[in-house]
Structure formats: structure tokens, C-alpha cells
Image (tube, rainbow, N blue to C red):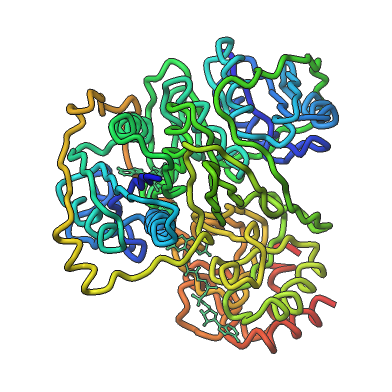
Amino acid sequence: MAVLVVADHTNAALGEATAKTVAAAQKLGGDIDILVAGQGARPAADAAAKLAGVRKVLLAESDALGHQLAEAVTDTVVSLAGGYDAILIPATSAGKNYSPRIAAKLDVNQITDVIEVVSPDTFVRPIYAGNALETVQSSDAKKVITVRPTAFKPVADGGSAPVETVAAAPAAGREAGFVGEEVVKSDRPELAGAKIVVSGGRAMGSAEEFHRVIEPLADKLGAAVGASRAAVDAGYAPNDYQVGQTGKVVAPDLYIAVGISGAIQHLAGMKDSKVIVAINKDADAPIFQVADYGIVGDYKTVVPELMAALG
Amino acid sequence: MKVLVPVKRVIDYNVKVRVKPDQTGVDLANVKMSMNPFDEIATEEAVRMKEKGVATEVIAVSIGPVQAQETIRTALAMGADRGILIQTDVDVDPLAVAKLLKAVIAEENPDLVVMGKQAIDGDNNAVGQMLAALLDWPQATFASKIEVADGKASVTREIDGGLQTLEVSLPAVITADLRLNEPRYASLPNIMKAKKKEIAIKTAADYGVDVASKLKVLKVTEPPKRSAGVKVENAAELVAKLKTEAGVL
Ligand SMILES: Cc1cc2nc3c(=O)[nH]c(=O)nc-3n(C[C@H](O)[C@H](O)[C@H](O)COP(=O)(O)OP(=O)(O)OC[C@H]3O[C@@H](n4cnc5c(N)ncnc54)[C@H](O)[C@@H]3O)c2cc1C
Ligand SMILES: Nc1ncnc2c1ncn2[C@@H]1O[C@H](COP(=O)(O)O)[C@@H](O)[C@H]1O
């Protein structure tokens, strides 16, 4: 058995989802290699080489891989696929983009968003916004699996795997061209892996209010900032803050929902948090059905009091 | 320009899903079904392309039971021109859906496929990328803005940390994210008009695609339940409990 993990990374750094995906790979058993497909991605490859239990790291570089364009990543992974029984990809926004393309090129189904490895061919995955869990058995010879990072504890550092350079597959088919990117760098922890998350909802009413209320609370707690779909749609918070079925899945030690009603689509993204706190003026809001601690009240008074109580 | 929009009939997003006691699946008897919300967004986008004169024809395709005709009718009422139903009672998995769509594309030769990023039942987020792979077409997923001109589409995509812009030459596959547009409600006259539009009924066998899945569902279970906790009086009490009882601060 040999498993290839496709790394989540930003060229300069390895994403936390990679170590969690390696943990899932260990449950499959066998040798584990990590592919870092990027450009100027040596730092990410060196970080991957330090993960415990990795046989080797493969580094493939090209301009198209630098932007993780789906066509380029797919062709490179497919060119390496012959040596592996399973390909594991973190279910991050980049991984979700290219993984199904890889699966289809290999003529297999993707096993999506795996939260538990039952055996090398049997997996558990959430469906219907996490309202049901499906146990599936795959009879495909080669498995392409996306791993839900929040469901696995990251493997520790301590390894020293060799880094081997491999060729990026040449552009073969018709490919999308990269035009540009607007990416905001934040000093806050990454939402998907943060220990504490503070999320704001429609109740904020404006982007200014979101900044004024949610961000200082998050900063006081060293937390990442999240949002409901309603807050994102209304432009109070950026797209990638959306927590939920069709946004990010988070499972921090502490999740604080401020002015969020708790629609099933939102719960799908945060109900595996260790401790949930809800602040909502409606005592019947569904969020209280999953909250460990709830405060019924207007966030305009509760959040300042909370800031004061935190000292 | 001809645009193809695959639309799936799924459980309505407002319905609370229940797992069947025998663990064979979820209970779909007598529950409200609707068009997958992301496919409404895709349909809206295609119809707007037609209204702007960029697209000439919009074809809605669904793979599903006979009732999926209603889903196609919804697309027709929104402004799609005609529909194709590939009728099957099998729960067709994403790879087979992509193969069927590829076969439809071989007959219809559309210039663009606009579809949802994710069906909210299986939550796979896979068919669009798979279809692009099978066709060897460029893909642009999670679109929040699409501009088509001169045989190309400029697509703004939602990525971690912000937005990315790609240019794809047509034909291409684009998948819609939530912020692409706000789908319209079909007007009564348009619902009436849609009744006269054509829906071709086909089977998977017509396209020579085997829809038997290599993924076997062993069981479907309830997720662990979270129970409601306590209401606290004020912020001071909350902080105390988070520190001592929960140990997370
Ligand atoms: C296809 C699809 C996908 C979706 N995906 C997602 C997703 O990934 N993530 C997601 O979050 N949603 C998603 N949704 C949307 C979801 O159904 C809800 O509409 C959304 O989560 C509601 O956001 P909200 O809780 O902020 O707003 P609302 O439901 O409007 O709730 C606002 C809450 O704020 C409270 N409030 C108001 N004023 C105050 C105040 N002054 N102080 C305290 N509390 C106050 C109200 O009591 C209310 O409970 C999706 C929907 C669809 C159809
Ligand atoms: N049975 C189906 N019929 C038509 N379109 C489908 C079907 N299944 C999936 N799709 C399309 O593929 C998209 C992604 O679905 P999925 O990969 O299953 O999450 C959906 O938003 C639809 O546009």
C-alpha cells in the first residue's frame, strides 16, 4: 500500500490541513509520500519533510502550479498516480477545486470529505449538511479521497524525509489562464485551524459594525473571525469568512456565534466545535439548541460586557 | 452561444433531514423537493447571458426520477429554452452524472456549461470538475462573477483569502458559488409559457453510460447529537464558566 498526500500550501508555507491529511493517510496504512505542487515552494516542501511518518516529499514546480490551477495540479498528480493505491487531498478550497478533476482523469469516483477511515476501502462522510453520516465502501482499484481536516489530529513534526524534485506535467489539454488575485493577508489565525473562532451574523447590520464588534473581540481572544452566509452576502465580511455547509468547516475549542440564528447550513460548519457560545436576543433561536452556553440579549450590550469581563 | 445548465432535484434546503431507522438512507417520502439552490444561481446566470444577447439558447438537463421534470420546468420558467431529462430511479453518483453530461454535450455542442458548485444532498462538489476533466475543457469553479466576450470567459472565483480571476477560452465548465447572483422568482406568465416548452425524455442507456456505482453505501446513520447547554445571565458568568467549567480560556 502506498498513499500520496497532496499538500495544502501557499508555496512559502505548509497549510495545517496537510498534517491532518497525513494523519488520515496513516489510518489507511502503508508508505506515505507528500506532493508539494507549486512554484518557489521549497519552504513548504521542507516543512512537509519534517512531518512524522512520511517516506518522501515530492516537489513539482511550474508557474501554473504556483497558482494551483486545477488543470496543472491534476496533470502532475495523474502523472505520479501509477505508484499509489490512494491519493488523499485535504478538503480545502484549493483541494476541492482540483480533486474531482484528478478522480475523473483516473476514472474513479471521489470519496468526498472523509471524517473517518473505517478500513482501507471503507469510509464515513457527512451528507445533507452533516445531518446524516454515510458509510461507503469503494471497489475502485485506486482511491481518490478528500479529507475533512477538522476530523483528524495533525501528525507531529519530528520526521526528516528526503525531498525529491519531480517534473511538473507539461500543459497538455486546454487550460484556464491565471489573470490575477486579490488576497488579503491577515495577522489573525487561519479560520479553518483556529483554536477560537468568533463569528458574526446578519444582526451586525453593516460592515462597519462587523469591524467594530466582532474583530476586537476576536483579537482579545487571539481568535479567527468567521461569519454567517447572511453577513457575507450583505458584504459585512469577506467571502472566505463564511462558516457552513458550503463555506468553511471549523472545529475550534471555542466557537462564539454573535447574532447568528443557527440555520442548519451554518451548524454544518461549526457543530463539531468543542464548546459553543451563542449570543442572540431571541431566546428561541435554533443556535441555542447546540450552544453549551447561551446569553439571551442584545449583542450591543453583551459584547462590551464580555470585553470587560475578559479584562 | 449555446449554454447548458445541469439542474438537480434535491430535498428543499429548509427541510430537516431524517435518517431512516433501518439505516438505508434518509427519508424522502413526502418531503418537499426543489431545484438545488446552486443550480438556480447557474440557471439565473445563463438566462441573464441570454437576456444580454451573449447566449442564444439555454438548455436545462437533469438526471433523476420522472419528477425531475418539475425541476426542469422551474428552469424553463426562469427563462431556459428547452430541457432534457435523463430519467432514472438510481441515485447516480457524480462520475456517472459527469459521463452522462459529457454524452449530452457530444450531441448538443454547447459553448459553455454553467452549473452549481455543489448539490446540497450529497455535498460532493465534484461533477463540474469531473465533467471538465472528461471533456479536457478548462474549468473555473466557485464563480462569483462571469464575463463572456470574444470566445472567452473571465471568471472571478472565491478562494481562501480573497478572489482569483481566471480566463478560460470556450468551451469551458464554470461552477457557481453563492455570490454570483440572486436568482429570480418565475412570474406566473413565464410559468405558463414554460408548460409549452419542450422536454426530451431519455434514459442512461440511450447514452451508453453505466450508472451502477462503484461506491457502495453500507449504512446511513445519525450524527452524534449535541444537546443544548445552559443559559447564563451575563458576560461575567460566561467568562467564569469558560475558564473553570469548560477550560477553554
Ligand atoms: C444553498 C445554501 C447554502 C447555504 N450555506 C450557508 C453556509 O455555508 N453558512 C451559513 O451561515 N449559511 C448558509 N446558508 C444560509 C442559511 O440558510 C441562513 O440563511 C444563514 O445562515 C442566516 O444567517 P444569520 O444567522 O446571520 O441571519 P439570520 O437568520 O437573519 O439571524 C440573525 C440572528 O441575529 C439575531 N439578532 C438580531 N439582532 C440582534 C441583536 N441586536 N443582538 C443579538 N442578536 C440579534 C436574531 O435574533 C437572529 O437569530 C445557505 C443557504 C443556502 C440556501
Ligand atoms: N442528477 C443530476 N442532474 C443534473 N445535474 C446534476 C446532477 N447531479 C449533480 N448535478 C450538477 O452538478 C453540480 C454539482 O453536484 P455535486 O458534485 O453532486 O455536488 C450540481 O450543482 C448540478 O449542477
B56 with respect to A181 (left or right):
left
Residue A4 at x, y percent in the picture: 62, 21
The quadrant in which the N terminus of chain A is found is: top right
- Which quadrant does the C terminus of chain A fall into? bottom right
Residue drawn 83% across and 37% down?
A12
Residue A223 drawn at (x, y percent): 75, 62
The answer to whether residue A309 of the structure is visible from this angle is: yes
Tell me what residue is drawn at x 16 percent, y 37 percent. Answer: B202
Q: Is residue B33 left or right of residue B240?
A: left
Front residue (pair A170, A92): A170
Q: Residue furthest top?
A: A83
Residue at screen point 53% across, 34% down: B138
**Percent of width and height locating residue B122:** 38, 45
Residue A117 appears anywhere in the view: no
Q: Where is residue A281 in the image (x, y as percent from the top left)?
A: 55, 86
- Residue at point 65%, 18% (across, down): A169
In this view, A1 is above or below A4: above
In the rendered image, the vertical position of residue B207 relative to residue B117, given as above or below? above
Above or below — where is A179 with respect to A214?
A: above
Depth order, front residue of B38/B74: B74
Q: In which quarter of the image is residue A84?
A: top right
- Judge from the rendering whether residue B207 lies leftward or rightward of residue A239; answer left or right: left
Q: Determine whether A44 is above or below B194 in the image.
A: above
Specify the quadrant of the image occupied by residue A296: bottom right
